[in-house]
Image (cartoon, coloured by chain):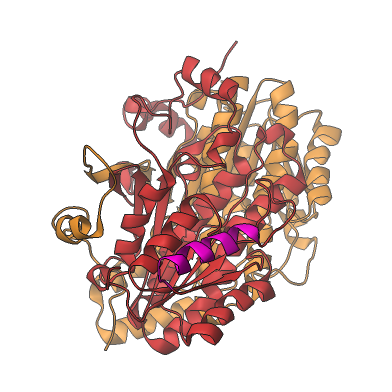
Amino acid sequence: MPAMLDGKVAVVTGAGRGIGRGISIALAAAGAKVVVNDYGVDIHGNVPTDAPANEVVGEIKKAGGQAISNGDSVAEWDAAERIIQTAVKEFGRIDILVTCAGILRDRMIFNMSEDDFDSVLAVHLKGTFNCIRHACVLMRQQKYGRIITFTSGSGLFGNPGQANYGSAKAGISGLTKVAARDLGKYGVTVNSIAPVAATRMTLTDEFLKAREIRKQQGIIREERALAQLEDLKPEDVAPVVVYLASDYAANVNGQFFLCAGGSVSLLSQPRAVKTIFKDEGAWTLDELDEIVPLTLAEGLVNPAPPRE
Amino acid sequence: MGERLKGKVAVVTGAGRGIGRGIALLLAQEGAAVVVNDLGGAIDGSGSSSGPAQEVVTEIKAKGGRAIANADSVADFGAAENIIKSAVKEFGRLDILINVAGILRDRMIFNLSEEDWDAVVKVHLKGTFNCVRHASVQMREQKGGRIINFSSTSGLYGNSGQANYGAAKDGIAGLTRVVSRDLGKYGITVNAIAPVAATRMTATVSDQARETRAKRGITAGAPAIQMRMEPEDVAPMVVYLTTDNAKNINGQTFLIRGSVISLLNYPAPARTITKIGRWKPEEIAAIFPSTFGMDLVNPAPRQD
């Protein structure tokens, strides 16, 4: 039986560690030739090194797969082009692009520096765009392609202290939806994963400290949910990505999947849950004062109510 | 003149024309002192002129309201600080921030240049961050505030040809959700509007593009029937969100088209498959059609 991705060529960014590493290994195991891209920096985006990407390539080759490492930064337009060109030069084409590369610099909005915002946006959002932009030209020509981006619950649901990361990740979700519509007719699909997994990006000192505080405050529900994070392995995200990269998923396009361990969810698309309208003319404030509390705002919960 | 916002101070970016102008006028009409910010550039972000902002100020003053014009660019971190500071300097505080400023540079993704990407993301997403960042410090000290950002159906649903704009606008939706959680406990609310209105920005979508979309059945954002969608129609709900009545509405997104106003959902799992342990790709391929695949629609199916 041929493997699911026999003859395909893939690029995985941020593939040196965590989720990207798991995906590279799984793609290679399914028969794809893989460009293992990793800039090799720490989680804040500093101190680049080739080591993590090279290790993953070594691991893939040892298992009988084909792979090559690349240490370019996705955040730079020309460097991103080199990543994509590495696939073409080395393996003759590019069929699959998986964009995992990312960094973290958490701060409450009122303390966030311009550099903290710019750096996170440059790697996640601009980096995802850079890679898609260069890959999609080739995929459009060959009338085939699979792009899988990485968004996050932080942007979709809102995590405090992550204005930069949440903006970037939600931006990737918008980019995914538009690119799916721009590229679908050429046989290129664009889907997105919101992963939950224990990696060096999530099991941070800050996270562990915050969890300890929550535990002490007796916020049981959250503590319960978070206690499982260590059980959610980064490798668990890979099978869905392999599926989306395969011919089986030819008609899955513009969709979002939440992946946490053995649990995979299709996320709902935005839709109106409540609507008010009037037949003639614009609403007046007097009317809204009266009707909004009984309709649109009825039952709404403030996610962070004022503390007196 | 209303009294709802008496003593409040507001900043409205991109307030020289269209939706921003309508909001600035209604805020002033309800008693707020308004900083009317507009760089006064073209749709694509080129050029600048203090004309549009000044005209809105004149209009507000003619009706007995209080306003000053500001022509700083939201896209620059330091200039955005000037916008916020001009409210504090002129009117003594800042209660309301409305982020409307934006530009458009539509291209299919395979033709989108780095510059077209950067320019649009910089004004919309970075510009919104810049203003929110500087305003949040002031509002946190005051223990109160109202921030309303502008997202778009382009990002929420995905409009072909708008990778830059859609990414920026969905980014703003994410920023809104995070910041509502950062600031809520200080009595500050942060909400987003996805407006549909006939302005000079939507007028740039060519008739040909509209026809093509209609022919392909791509009607996202296009009205099935003729409905009113004046830029001024967006203002009442925005101003409502700035009032004390809306103090507990936080982290939400509202879709506004004419007099139709909708509350949008948060994304949530629609279907879930669970296995103890790790899935195999082949298992997902086998189970997908009868689970997730049941009602999936490809928004742009392959054309052979």
Q: Which span of residues is magenta-colored? A: B51-65
Instruction: Measuring from the top left, give residue A251's x and y in whole percent.
Output: 48, 23
Magenta stretch containing residue B64, yes or no?
Answer: yes
In the picture, one chain is orange; tell me its letter.
A
Q: Residue at the spot x=45%, y=63% of the render?
A: B24
Q: Residue at the spot x=52%, y=18% of the render?
A: B211
Residue A224 seen in render? yes
Instruction: Measuring from the top left, give residue A138's x and y in whole percent.
Output: 75, 28
Pick out the residue farthest to the front.
Answer: B62
Between A57 and A140, which is closer to the camera in this rendering? A140
Task: Check the image and report above or below for A162 versus A240.
Answer: below
Instruction: Measuring from the top left, give residue A190's x and y in whole percent.
Output: 56, 35
Q: Main secondary structure of the magenta part?
A: helix
Task: Check the image and report above or below for B232 versus B222.
Answer: below
Between A39 and B300, which is closer to the camera in this rendering? B300
Question: In what quadrant of the picture does the N terminus of chain A appear?
Answer: top right
Instruction: Measuring from the top left, give residue B131's x and y in whole percent.
Output: 56, 70
Between B275 and B117, which is closer to the camera in this rendering? B117
In the picture, one chain is red; tell me its letter.
B
